[in-house]
Amino acid sequence: MQNKINSNFRSSLKSILFGGACLFAITQSAHAIETSAREAYLIDYTTKTVLINKDAEVSMPPASMSKIMTAYMVFERLKDGRLSLDDKLPVSEKAWRKGGSKMFVEVGKEVSIHDLLRGIIVQSGNDACIVVAEGLGGSEENFALEMTAKARELGMENSTFANATGWPDPGQRMTAKDLAILADRIITDFPEFYDVYSEKSFTWSGISQGNRNPLLYKNLGADGLKTGHTEEAGYGLTASAKQGDRRIIMVLNGMGSAKERAEESARLVSWAFREFDNFELFKAGETVDTADVWLGTEKTIDLVPEDDLLLTLPRNAKNKMTATVNYVGPIQTPIEKGERLGTLTIAAPDIDTVEVPLVAANSVEREGGFSRIVSALNYLIFGKS
């Protein structure tokens, strides 16, 4: 049986005009925007809707964006109690001598985890990364193996690490999608530490350095995460921004200059918030439609979604949305609460069709023998049970 959605749904559709957390991911295609980035991936944090996907699963050198994983390894130990912010780690000669961006730690000294995190996140210090890797993993090589194992655990299937810094190495590879997964987990798993990513400067050894994330200096709601640059990788940025109830995560790589990175990232963040919004269609357990029941102790059953249904859609799509409920009815008894009975199909121009399972709101027992006979006769004569 196929029904255009009932009045309950029409009234719920009105509520989406006021916006609305899911739980259902769709992919935008026709609304994609061109970008000069070689690789790009942009998603809505709550619904996981993909707004931009340009070679997002192609292996690439992540440069210093891989330091997000180095920080994740520290945050995890802080959260489970193996480490505290006051703990100190020694600076080796290898860390002190490391080139590239530096925190300027001194060989033979000890530095607290609190300061090392800022050296890694704000100053992008390669030396700080090595101090952490050696202190927590025994060696940078062992720590890199731990990073790769953790990546697999987090679902980052295309990430491998040869070092803790992002220093060029054939074994240091990630994808834009994996970086977005990692950013998502940083935000979700460690809210108590995430605000370090929004710090605009940090001073160590009398040297003050600014955060290289260009979005932090624009009024776009940006609060993280990390830039990267090497000759092979080009200029990259893994970023997140929040405006109102919406948060987006964006990964760009392969741009030609810091100026291009700043301009392109700001343009795409603005586009994502301007062109799309999150629309709440139904709460979990809210009635979408009502179906007739065959030979049951109740004559009808409510069809409901198991989870809140929140969709990220182009702002102009809400007025062109259609919805259909599909189920085979009348529905045979007995019916168990939570049993899948049908599907809600939502369609709108320029988006992939969304199909949401509908389940029984409650259980319905089968009627006794005599009642079943009466109900069957009623159905044959009057067309209803």
Image (cartoon, rainbow, N blue to C red):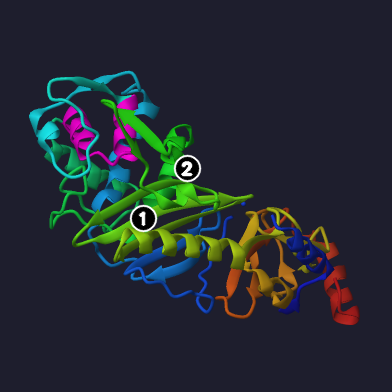
Along the line of sight, which residue is nearer the eye, 325 or 68? 68
Which quadrant would residue 198 be assigned to in this image?
top left
Name the quadrant of the N terminus. bottom right
Which quadrant would residue 36 be assigned to in this image?
bottom left
- Residue in view at x 70 percent, y 54 percent: 283
Residue identifier under label 1:
237
Q: Is residue 76 above or below residue 244?
A: above
Instruction: Count the labels in the image.
Output: 2
Q: Amino acid at mark 1?
A: Leu
Compared across the picture, whether 318 is left or right of 241 comes to right
Q: Percent position (x, y) of residue 84?
A: 34, 21
Along the line of sight, which residue is nearer the eye, 192 or 356? 192
Which residues are drawn in magenta? 114-137
Q: Amino acid at mark 2?
A: Thr
The label shown at residue 97 is: none
User: In this orientation, does residue 338 appear?
Assistant: yes
Crowd tier of the residue under label 1, counting other residues whose Cα lies within 10 Å: few below 14, some 14–19, many 20 or above = many
- Which mark's residue is nearer the viewer, 2 or 1? 1
Q: Percent position (x, y) of residue 4?
A: 76, 77
Residue identifier under label 2:
188
- Residue in view at x 77 percent, y 61 percent: 301
